[in-house]
Image: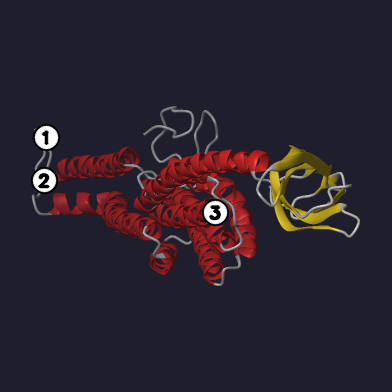
Amino acid sequence: MFCHKCGEQLLEKSRFCSNCGEKVLTTEERVEQTLDTKEISLGSELHTSEKSRLDQELSRTITENQTTAVAEIAATTEAFEPEEDEGQTIQQTDVPRGRFLKKLPILIPVVSLLLAGGGVSASYFNETNKNEKVLALQQSAETAALNGEYTKAEKALQSALHMRPAYAVLQQDMEAVHRASSNMAELTAISEKIKEQNFVEAEDILSSLKETIESEVDPLFEPFTELIEAKEVTITVGKIKQELSELTTVNQLINKLTLVARLPSEEAAAVKEQILTKIVQISSDHAEQQLQKKQFSDAIATINQGLEYATDNKTLLSFKEKIEQEQAAFEEAEQTRLEQAIEAAAREDLQNYTAAVEITSFEYEVDEYGDLYLYGEVTNVATKDISSVTIDYTIYDLEGNSLDDRSTTVYPYYVNRGEQGSFEDVVFYLSQDVNVEVDNITWFVE
């Protein structure tokens, strides 16, 4: 045998190493020490190579012990065989018995060694079986935790800890499961806040939870990153939905649409459709107001802005066609009105220059002295003011012979449109009855 510390060969039945002074362990003590050393390292982190190495080491120890025991038994058995010496006669029945009694002190530790080896083997297989159960429970707990079944994971880890209470990794796994369960409870609280449309508080809780998850390194917390991202999308979408009723312009809606476009989810797609629907509605209403004011170009620009985002929207396309038709009709009518206005202006000018003055009263008489008195009133029937109105008239005798051509001026000098002016004149020494006819009226258009 050799010292387990310095490797020096030991003297038979030595209790201490003559080289280093280390206590010489019995075979049973060495095996138990090996088991105690390896037991605390068995668990989920005990890989196949580590288990295999331990198995081989224990098997080798047991085999060595058993081999040693067998060798010693064989040596003892040989001692029982009788020795033949020439010249001596030994009774066959007495010699083996005497030698057996002499070897009895040697047989007792050998048998004890064999019994100890069997106990070590049983202990080894029992510990190995226990470790396999712990590994299975830990694996089951990990699978359950990754699936969000934290209660199931905790039960599995409790069972494993019951078998290996000193195994620190199991305790660490239990603490990680507790934290994950707490984090999931916070996600549930966030969902409740979202249902209540209390997005501000939901956002605060989520921000704190996000910082907590970012500090975790255990793979158990990796699924939380995706769950947090989904909640962020839900909160953003909820806030936009909440604000939609307050948005009244297309530009405001476009800003929200740009924000939603960066959110990859079905929920974001749904609110995008709501925003587009409101863009169509607001664009149509605004364009209708512009159309009523005959602001055709502005109305078409409003519809085109909506079509940039609500592409190929039937409502907007139909409205644009309506605007274009009304614009064409209006322009045609305007052309007609323009032509009519030109004609009216021409007629107006004609009237203003040829028939702006209308005689509304005209009287004349020859008095007892033979003098002719005439007077009357005119009205400005033009569309503009006139001035310097002059009345040309001719005096005829009763036989129709022209006696004199005369003219008189209307006063006031300026006669506004629709107003009246007066005129009068005297012709002396006619001394006969006469007829007077107005030949012409002249004026200036202002």
Q: For the point 49% across and 39% down, which residue is it?
A: 339
- Going from N to C along the chain, the mark reached first, 2 or 3, is 2
Residue located beneath label 2 in the image: 90
Give the CA separation, mark 1 to mark 2: 9 Å
In percent of width and height, residue 237 lies at 51, 56
Query: Which of the two residues, 366 or 305, is positioned nearer the viewer here?
Result: 366
Q: Residues within 10 Å of mark 1 (few under 14, many from 20)?
A: few
Q: Are the two marked residues, 1 and 2, in contact with CB atoms closer than 8 angstroms? A: yes
Q: Which of marks 1 and 3 is in front?
A: 3
Residue under the point 65% across and 45% down: 355
For the rendered model, the colour scheme is secondary structure
> Mark 3 — residue?
286
Is residue 24 visible in the rendered structure shown here? no
Provide residue 349's location: percent of width, then percent of height. Answer: 63, 39
> Is 241 placed above or below 16 here?
below
Q: The residue under label 1 is which amino acid type?
A: Asp
Q: How far apart are marks 1 and 3 (CA)?
A: 135 Å
The residue labelled by disc 1 is 85
Residue shown at 53% from the left, 61% from the top: 241
* Crowd tier of the residue under label 2, counting other residues whose Cα lies within 10 Å: few below 14, some 14–19, many 20 or above: few
* Quadrant where the image shows the C terminus: top right
Task: Report the amino acid beneath label 3.
Answer: His
Q: Is residue 193 left or right of residue 308?
A: right
Secondary structure under tag 3 reads helix
Crowd class of label 3 (few under 14; some 14 to 19; many from 20; radius 10 Å): some
Q: Please state which of residues 149 and 254 is positioned toward the viewer in this rendering.
A: 254
Quadrant of the snapshot with the N terminus: top left
The percent coordinates of residue 31 (x first, y second) are: 37, 47
Question: The residue tagged with tag 1: helix, strand or loop?
Answer: loop
* Residue 299 visible in the snapshot: yes
